[in-house]
């Protein structure tokens, strides 16, 4: 979990720095470098958003696992796992929804 948060903060800091450099380049009429810096800032901003989503998902999964370990019956997460949207309801591993969770052979025995 901490890794996602660290990457998010690093990407955000990089995006802010590149955005400041973009403004400085535009101010000095250096338009070609400004375009490159703006694209770099956009890429880092997208990375920061992606890492934020991964961090929030890791927090949700940890809370779900904690509730399950306490013997509670937590509701499945939405989507149930990383394959939830692309599996179209097929069974898969590491899923929070018992209807689509694939069992290992040793679990079914």
Image (cartoon, rainbow, N blue to C red):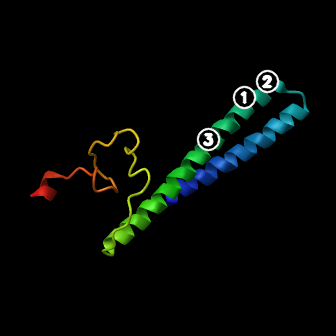
How far apart marks 1 and 3 lie (CA) works out to 16 Å
Most distant residue in the right direction: 28
- Among the two numbered marks 1 and 3 on one chain, the one whose residue lies closer to the N terminus: 1
Left or right relative to 81: residue 27? right
Q: Secondary structure at mark 3?
A: helix
Residue 57, position in %: x, y? 48, 55
Q: Which mark is residue 32?
A: 2
How crowded pointer 2 is (Cα within 10 Å; few <14, some 14-19, many 20+) is rated as few
The residue labelled by disc 3 is: 46
Instruction: Say which quarter of the image contains residue 106.
Output: bottom left
Q: Which of 33/104 is in front?
A: 104
CB contact under 8 Å: marks 2 and 1: yes
Q: Secondary structure at mark 2?
A: helix
How far apart marks 2 and 1 lie (CA) works out to 7 Å
The residue labelled by disc 1 is: 36
Residue 84, position in %: x, y? 38, 45
Residue 46, position in %: x, y? 61, 41
Q: Is residue 8 above or below residue 69?
A: above
The mark total stands at 3
Left or right relative to 60: residue 21? right
């Amino acid at each position: 979990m901490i890794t996602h948060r660290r990457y998010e903060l690093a990407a955000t800091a990089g995006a802010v720095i590149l955005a400041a450099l973009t403004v400085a380049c535009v101010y000095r009429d250096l338009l070609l470098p400004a375009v490159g810096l703006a694209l770099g800032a956009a890429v880092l901003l997208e990375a920061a958003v992606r890492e934020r989503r991964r961090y929030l998902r890791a927090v949700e999964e940890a809370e779900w696992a904690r509730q399950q370990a306490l013997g509670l019956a937590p509701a499945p997460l939405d989507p149930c796992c990383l394959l939830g949207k692309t599996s179209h309801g097929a069974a898969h591993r590491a899923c929070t929804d018992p209807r689509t969770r694939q069992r290992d052979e040793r679990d079914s025995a």
